[in-house]
């Protein structure tokens, strides 16, 4: 089974998402974060799911979508996936901000 590794940037993104949503609803903030975690867990069973991030055209950098969020991950090898960032779909993504 594939191991999921959360980078510090991705964890920080998740925390920021929770803080932003919790200004309006603590409950909805937790639901959103849980959905993102659940979606990431699906990569353990299907590591090649999602699409190649169009901005980068690199087959090892992929994304899955959960609600309004792009979960960008890097296929390190057959045994490990790094969660790089979690971006709101309205934001522009820059490769320099992935690591």
Image (spheres, helix red, strand yellow):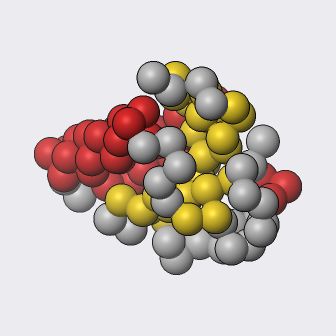
Residue 86 visible, this angle: no
Q: Nearer the viewer, residue 67 or 21?
A: 67
Q: Nearer the viewer, residue 47 or 6?
A: 47
Tell me: 93 left or right of 71: right
Q: How many marks?
A: 0
Residue 60 location in percent, x, y? 71, 50
Q: Nearer the viewer, residue 74 or 18?
A: 74
Quarter of the picture containing the C terminus is top right
Q: Residue at (15%, 45%) from the top-left corner?
A: 27
Residue 6 to residue 71: above or below:
above
Residue 35 to residue 66: above or below:
above
Residue 74 location in percent, x, y? 67, 43
Quarter of the picture containing the N terminus is top left
Tell me: 23 left or right of 53: left
Residue 7 location in percent, x, y? 63, 31
Q: In the image as oriented, which residue stretches furthest toward the left? A: 27
Residue 65 visible, this angle: yes
Q: Residue at (32%, 55%) from the top-left corner?
A: 21
Q: Nearer the viewer, residue 32 or 74?
A: 74
Q: Residue at (42%, 62%) from the top-left corner?
A: 65
Q: In the image as oriented, which residue stretches furthest toward the right? A: 96
Q: Residue at (38%, 36%) from the top-left corner?
A: 45
């Amino acid at each position: 089974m594939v191991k999921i590794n959360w980078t510090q940037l991705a964890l920080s993104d998740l925390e920021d998402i929770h803080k932003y949503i919790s200004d309006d609803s603590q409950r909805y903030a937790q639901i959103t974060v849980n959905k993102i975690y659940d979606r990431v867990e699906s990569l353990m069973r299907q590591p090649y799911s999602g699409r190649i991030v169009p901005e980068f055209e690199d087959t090892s950098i992929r994304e899955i979508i959960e609600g309004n969020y792009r979960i960008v991950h890097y296929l390190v090898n057959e045994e490990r996936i790094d969660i790089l960032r979690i971006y709101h779909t309205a934001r522009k993504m820059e490769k320099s901000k992935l690591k």
